[in-house]
Image: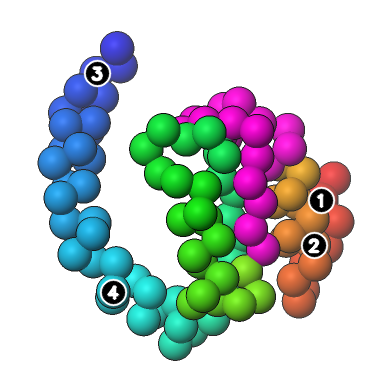
């Protein structure tokens, strides 16, 4: 109900048509750059299969992948768990430090 939100969601939904065509470029970037990668995924997501989360490890073998008890909005459903995983992920990286 926030002003402009309907337009934002419509634009986002329309842009989904370009996502699949963009996958090869994104996957190549991941393979070439090997960024630190944390993937948190709702195992009960009706839009994306759980196996898709593991696919990130094909391109970034050191990726940290977590299947959580949640759906498409896992961040809202498992906010504390994702915050904890994110904190641990960041601390474990070079230059990372414990958060307050």
* Residue drawn at (71%, 41%) of the image: 83
Report helix, strand or loop for mark 3: loop
The numbered mark, 1 or 4, whose residue comes first in the sequence reads 4
Q: Closer to us: mark 3 or mark 2?
A: 2
Q: Residue furthest bottom?
A: 32
- Residue 41 appears left or right of 5: right
Image spot of residue 50 (x, y percent)? 52, 47
> Residue under circle 4?
24
Closer to the camera, 46 or 15? 46
> Residue under circle 3?
3
Closer to the camera, 92 or 47? 47
The numbered mark, 1 or 2, whose residue comes first in the sequence reads 2
* Residue drawn at (20%, 23%) of the image: 6
Residue span colored magenta: 64-82
Report helix, strand or loop for mark 2: helix
Q: How is the image coloured?
A: rainbow
């Amino acid at each position: 109900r926030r002003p402009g939100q309907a337009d934002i969601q419509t634009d986002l939904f329309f842009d989904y048509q370009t996502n699949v065509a963009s996958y090869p470029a994104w996957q190549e970037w991941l393979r070439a750059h090997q960024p630190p990668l944390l993937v948190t995924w709702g195992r009960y997501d009706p839009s994306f299969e759980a196996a898709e989360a593991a696919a990130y490890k094909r391109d970034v073998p050191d990726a940290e992948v977590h299947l959580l008890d949640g759906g498409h909005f896992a961040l809202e459903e498992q906010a504390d768990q994702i915050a904890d995983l994110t904190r641990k992920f960041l601390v474990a990286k070079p230059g990372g430090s414990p958060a307050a």
